[in-house]
């Protein structure tokens, strides 16, 4: 009963390095989302995928790319990490049908030095 | 601009008493509102929701009230328990946008034994 699984849990990068955050869900949900959480700012939507094969920008997409690999997996890539991308990243999934709550993973804590 | 605001970063209450967490929104298009609870090192978990056609929704010890004219919602927890100590996020969405949520900043609730 895993739900939404994110890897890695922690990561430290130097400025300019790249990395991919992985996310997988086993609830057969159509939609997947990437949020970042920063102190005093709540959770902000980076990118989302309403269904397999589609991706769209959210509120704060700059510096990120995403790939909806299949229905289960949605990855977030930082091509050239910056200190401003230090944050906790949460992946979530939902049915994308009207009023469907999001189900979140446990997050990836990323530090960029 | 912050469309969903939680003006109290923290709240402390005694066990057994009522906890009231508040949330204001500015976007009149929002028609679905949710509360999430978050423990440290975990992802947010869905707690309770309300659609704009209602003004109250109850689930056990948790009740959410919606005042559309004031663009205000609140979460009441009665009676409060130490295990309720967590960060509470208010979130809002528009039905036609699927499950894309706009979150408030969060309120840290501490319930003292």
Image (spheres, coloured by chain):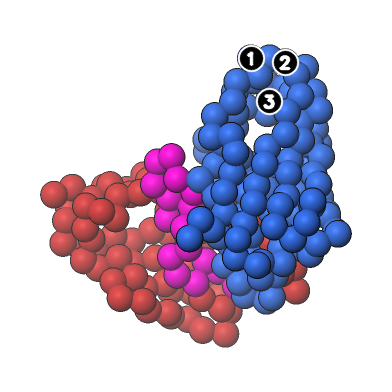
Q: In the rendering, at what x and y percent does residue B36 appear?
A: 47, 59
Q: Residues within 10 Å of mark 2 (few under 14, many from 20)?
A: some
Left or right relative to A69: residue B102:
left
Q: Are marks 1 and 3 on the same chain?
A: yes
Q: Are marks 2 and 3 on the same chain?
A: yes
In the depicted view, which residue is nearer to us: A7 or A81? A7
Magenta stretch: dominant SS? strand
Residue stretch rendered in magenta on the structure? B31-49
Q: Which chain is blue?
A: A
Q: What residue is shown with label 1? A: A113
Earlier along the polypeptide chain: callout 2 or callout 3? 2
Q: What residue is shown with label 2? A: A15
Task: Identify the secondary structure beneath mark 2.
Answer: loop
- Pointers 2 and 3 in contact (C-beta within 8 Å): no
Q: Is residue B34 above or below residue B15?
A: below
Q: In the rendering, at what x and y percent does residue A52 appear?
A: 81, 62
Q: Distance between the Cα atoms at labels 2 and 3?
A: 10 Å
Q: Are marks 2 and 1 on the same chain?
A: yes
Toward which corner of the image does residue A49 lie, by quadrant?
A: bottom right
Residue B84 seen from this side? yes
Residue B4 seen from this side? no
In the depicted view, which residue is nearer to us: B100 or A11? A11
Q: Which chain is red?
A: B
Give the mark count: 3
Earlier along the polypeptide chain: callout 2 or callout 1? 2
Q: Chain of mark 1?
A: A
Residue positioned most to the right? A53
Q: In the rendering, at what x and y percent does residue A93 appear?
A: 63, 60
Q: Distance between the Cα atoms at labels 1 and 3?
A: 10 Å
Residue B34 is covered by the magenta coloring:
yes
């Amino acid at each position: 009963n895993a739900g939404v699984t994110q890897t890695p849990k922690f990561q430290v990068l130097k400025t300019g390095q790249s990395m991919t955050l992985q996310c997988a869900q086993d609830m057969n949900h159509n939609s997947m989302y990437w949020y970042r959480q920063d102190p005093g700012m709540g959770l902000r939507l980076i990118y989302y995928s309403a269904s397999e094969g589609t991706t769209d920008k959210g509120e704060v997409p700059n510096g990120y790319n995403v790939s909806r690999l299949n229905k289960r997996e949605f990855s977030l890539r930082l091509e050239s990490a910056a200190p401003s991308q230090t944050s906790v990243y949460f992946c979530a999934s939902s049915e994308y049908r009207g009023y469907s709550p999001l189900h979140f993973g446990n997050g990836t804590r990323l530090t960029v030095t | 601009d912050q469309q969903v605001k939680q003006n109290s970063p923290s709240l402390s209450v005694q066990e057994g008493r009522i906890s009231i967490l508040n949330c204001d929104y500015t976007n009149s298009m929002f028609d679905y509102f949710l509360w999430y609870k978050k423990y440290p090192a975990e992802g947010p978990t869905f707690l309770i929701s309300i659609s704009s056609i209602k003004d109250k929704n109850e689930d056990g010890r948790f009740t959410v009230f919606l005042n559309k004219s004031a663009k205000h919602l609140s979460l009441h927890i009665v009676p409060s328990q130490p295990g309720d100590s967590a960060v509470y996020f208010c979130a809002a969405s528009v039905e036609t946008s699927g499950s894309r949520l706009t979150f408030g900043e969060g309120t840290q609730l501490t319930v003292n034994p």
